[in-house]
Amino acid sequence: MSHPNYDVFLSFRREDTRDNFTSHLYAELCRKRIETFIDDRLCRGEEISSALCKAIEESAVYVVILSEHYASSTWCLDELTKILECKDRYGREVIPVFYKVDPSTVRHQRKSYADDFVKHDLRFSDKVDAWKVALTQVANLSGWDSQKIRN
């Protein structure tokens, strides 16, 4: 079993949340001295790097920020697949945050998620089924919905 070097690993689509929700969450985690991994590099690969896989393996908790276009990123989808693999292997916690997207949209790959998968089917047909299963799994976990206001 891999020993965690990070308390939290943040998974997010940069264009949707980096300069708003994710940056605020990251700052607050740091303020609380919670060792948090965030990938600040601009990633233009089709597969996640070995360094990123290592960071996922070495994280205790995963916060997956599912936004409107999270599924447009093959990088995010590969990352999510790896996160869920580590959840199963090590029993680690995954906390989904539904940022301005309904959990059922993610769970059933509707709306923008459906559109994104039409594009992915052409180039990544060998991975699409695994990505869809991963999105359904994460959407079925108890998490936070940014569209619901708690009193």
Image (spheres, rainbow, N blue to C red):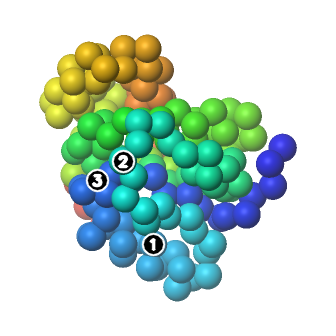
Q: Amino acid at mark 2?
A: Arg
Q: Position of residue 123 (x, y in %)?
A: 31, 20
Q: Which mark is residue 99?
A: 3
What residue would you read off at disc 1? 26
Viewport quadrant of the N terminus: top right
Q: In what element is the residue under mark 3?
A: loop
What residue would you read off at disc 2? 44
Depth order, front residue of 54/151: 54
Left or right of residue 56: residue 70: left
Q: In what element is the residue under mark 1?
A: helix
Q: Which mark is residue 93?
A: none
Viewport quadrant of the C terminus: bottom left
Q: Amino acid at mark 3?
A: Tyr
Q: Position of residue 35 (x, y in %)?
A: 63, 72
Q: Position of residue 23 (x, y in %)?
A: 36, 72
- Mark 2 vs 3, N-terminal side: 2
Q: Amino acid at mark 1?
A: Tyr
